[in-house]
Amino acid sequence: MIDPQILRNDPEVIRESQRRRGEDTQVVDLLVAADIAARDEQRVFDELRNSQKTLSKEIGPLQGQLKKNPSPELQQQVDQLMERASNLAAEVKAAEIKADDKAREVENLWLQVSNLVDLRSPVGGEEDFTLLETVGTPRDFAAEGFEPKDHLTIGQGLKAIDTERGAKVSGSRFYFLTGHGAMLEFALLNLAMAQAQVNGFIPMITPALVLPSAMEGTGFLGQAAENVYRVESDDMYLVGTSEVPLAAYHSDEIIPASQLPLRYAGWSSCFRREAGASGRDTTGIIRVHQFDKVEMFVYCDPADAQAEHERLLQWEKDFINALEIPYRVIDVATGDLGSSAARKFDIEAWIPTQGKYREVTSTSNTTEFQARRLKVRMRDDNGTRPLATLNGTLCAMPRIIVAILENHQNSDGSVNVPAALQPFLGGLTKLTAPATKSAGK
């Protein structure tokens, strides 16, 4: 959530952010009114509770006097105070219920408000991004004398990808990685984790199932809820990214500033319904329901968040550079941001057979938004306050595999292995179709 003082002192800041996102601004007006009402009800409760405490302090000594020196006058005084205390207790209880109800109303309204966008983010929808840089030159396959094959054709030829049996076993948008495909994923995982450790990240293997509090705290039960898998019988959720368990890892904790930044690299299987992607990328493994991913996650002082965001982007670029894949970097437009992100950079790899760049990694600065929801704070000489969190995908396996197969393919269907991956594939320099076994006699 956003600092409530911004709502109270300058709600127009929140309205403008909502407008830039293309989201509801009326919720801010409702929130302002609900916040005032909630504070009024809380004030009534606090005053009644203080009166109750004061009365209790009056009654105690009188009861002591009455026990030592009984008298009708003193008994009457105590009885009157006790009757008043009984009535006041009922008033306190009623006021507490009202205050709690109003507080819940405010909390529910806050859940409808996205993070404040960074004013440097371009305003608009998916196509209104700002191009920051283009790295590498796409291969001229025509000059090389052959037409490039798509990743699925290559993967099937290498016996590395099996979508037919994936669909048979689990339905559409599922797949098997076999042979070279499986080993390529393991190699990518090892390369990603090796790079992450060099850059000071703690490797983590995270839960794939989380409680509603973790999913809600990270902002994935708002606009992204349609793509979330819920296990209703246990009231738990399958994560779409290890960002969720990593963000909730320090929930309800206070972290000494001397320990920041804390950097984690989480590996997990990720699950997405892709409910809003009907008819898109139905062939191959670009848009699937289950995939593996290495996610970087950072807790830091809010003053350092912008610089940390730039570092995360550079580490993502280092990884894609090592794979020798042409790509571009974009500053994502406000209407295409997730609800928790103030600013997001995407890296899009060149996909030859589509003739365009496709997202393979992203990094978001979520400022204090998730930390406030999850009650993660830092303590320094100035006291205790919310910290900042950031996330960045280092390697989403299927899309990186797509980019490798298509960009490093040869005319005979083989695929050259980028030098950075070769040590993790036993020195293998080229992926080729396995030899066909001859039938036995």
Image (spheres, grey):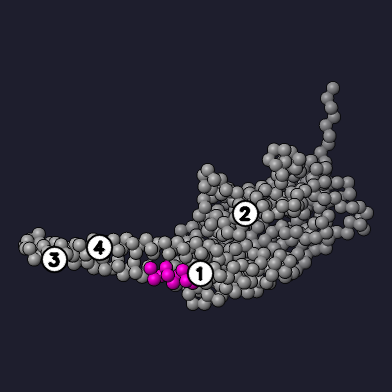
Count of numbered circles on the image: 4
Left or right, residue 85 beside residue 274? left
| Label 4 to label 3: alpha-carbon separation | 16 Å
Cβ atoms under marks 2 and 3 closer than 8 Å: no
Q: Which residue is mark 2?
A: 226
Residue type at tag 2: Glu
What element does badge 1 sit on?
Answer: helix
Residue type at tag 4: Asn
User: In which quadrant is the C terminus drawn?
Assistant: top right
Q: Which residue is mark 3?
A: 77
Q: Which marked residue is nearer to the observer: mark 2 or mark 3?
A: 3
The picture places residue 50, in percent across and down from the top left corner, at: 28, 68
Cβ atoms under marks 4 and 3 closer than 8 Å: no
The one of 381 and 103 positioned closer to us in this rendering? 103
Is residue 38 magenta-colored?
yes
| Label 2 to label 1: alpha-carbon separation | 25 Å
What element does badge 3 sit on?
Answer: helix
Q: Which residues are magenta?
A: 30-41
At 38% from the left and 63% from the top, the residue drawn is: 98
| Label 4 to label 1: alpha-carbon separation | 34 Å
Mark 2 or mark 1: whose residue is earlier in sequence: 1
Compared with 361, 432 (above or below) is above
Residue type at tag 3: Gln
Q: Is any part of residue 148 visible from this angle? A: yes
Mark 4 or mark 2: whose residue is earlier in sequence: 4
Compared with 139, 165 (above or below) is above
What element does badge 4 sit on?
Answer: helix
Left or right, residue 377 beside residue 332? left
Image mark for residue 30: 1
Residue type at tag 1: Leu
